[in-house]
Amino acid sequence: MLSKSIKITNAHGIHLRPASKMSDCAMAYDSSISFIYANGKEANVKSVISILASGLKMGDTIELRADGPDEEEALKEVSRALIDSMNMDD
């Protein structure tokens, strides 16, 4: 299992666009991909609803996790999708 901490930098937090970008990217991988937030709660990144239900706001930090046969590439690309989508609103 690999993980990476990511700080939410978008003034609107995680809304539909970044959630969709993350989920669409995650679906391309066989690995299990999730993130930990708010004192140990876990969200499934392959589910837009799970991501949106986390209610992430600007300044929150998540621990993105990937576990499986393509975990390295999955972590890299899903984190890139999230970061890029947050920057689109700036």
Image (cartoon, rainbow, N blue to C red):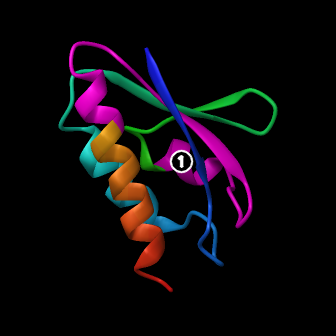
Q: On the picture, is 84 further left or further right than 15? A: left
Residue drawn 49% across the image and 27% down it? 3
Secondary structure beneath disc 1?
helix
Mark 1, Cα crowd under 10 Å, few <14 / some 14-19 / many 20+, is many
Q: Is residue 68 magenta?
A: yes
Q: How many marks?
A: 1
Q: Which residues are magenta?
A: 49-75
Q: Quadrant of residue 12?
A: bottom right
**What residue sits right under mark 1 in the picture?**
51
Quadrant the N terminus occupies: top left
Q: Is residue 44 above or below residue 69?
A: below
Horizontal and vertical percent for residue 22?
A: 37, 51
Instruction: Name the residue type under label 1.
Output: Ile
Residue lying at 26% horizontally and 47% vertically, measured from the top left: 25
Q: Residue placed at 18% from the left, 37% from the top?
A: 28
Q: Give x and y (percent) for residue 70.
A: 21, 21
Left of 57 or right of it: where is 33?
Answer: left
The x, y position of residue 17, in whole percent, is 41, 69
Please, which residue is most extreme toward the left here?
28
Residue at 37% over, 38% down: 46
Q: Is residue 17 visible?
A: no
The foreground one among 47 and 9 is 9
Q: Is residue 12 above or below residue 65?
A: below
Query: Where on the picture, by quarter, is residue 55?
Result: bottom right
Q: Position of residue 42 (x, y in %)?
A: 63, 29
